[in-house]
Image (spheres, grey):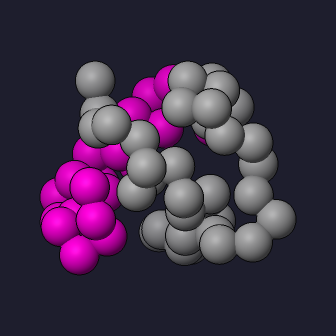
Amino acid sequence: MALSDMTRSEVEKAIAECDRLGRDLFLRRYGFRRARRYLLVHEGRQVEGEPFFRAPGPV
C-alpha cells in the first residue's frame, strides 16, 4: 500500500493495535525494531512510524 493510499482511520487502527499488543510485540509481529529515525507523534508520544505504513493492517 502506498503512503498516499493510507487514511487517518487506518493509521489510528494500527496505533490502537500497537497499544493493545504493546510496542515491542507489535514491532516483532511485523518484523521491525525500535526506530532511530522516522518517529510518528501521536497524542504527545513518539512511536515508530514505518510499521504503521508497512504492516498489512490491523488484525
- Residue 45 % position (x, y): 61, 65
Q: Is residue 25 left or right of residue 20?
A: right
- Residue 32 % position (x, y): 66, 40
- The prevailing secondary structure element of the residues shown in magenta is helix
Residue drawn at (26%, 55%) of the image: 1
User: Residue 2 is drawn in which quadrant?
Assistant: bottom left
Whether residue 45 is visible, yes or no, is: no
In the figure, 34 relative to 48: above or below?
Answer: above
Q: Does the magenta segment cover residue 36?
A: no
In the figure, 51 relative to 26: above or below?
Answer: below
Question: Which residue is at the far front?
Answer: 2
Residue drawn at (62%, 32%) of the image: 31
Question: Which residue is at the far right?
Answer: 36
Q: Which of the two residues, 27 or 22, is positioned nearer the viewer here?
A: 27
Residue drawn at (54%, 31%) of the image: 30
User: Residue 22 is drawn in which quadrant?
Assistant: top right
Q: Quadrant of the C terminus?
A: top left
Q: Which of the two residues, 42 or 30, is positioned nearer the viewer here?
A: 30
Q: Is residue 36 left or right of residue 9?
A: right
Q: Which residues are magenta?
A: 1-23
- Residue 36 % position (x, y): 82, 65
- Residue 44 % position (x, y): 56, 72
User: Residue 27 is drawn in which quadrant?
Assistant: top right
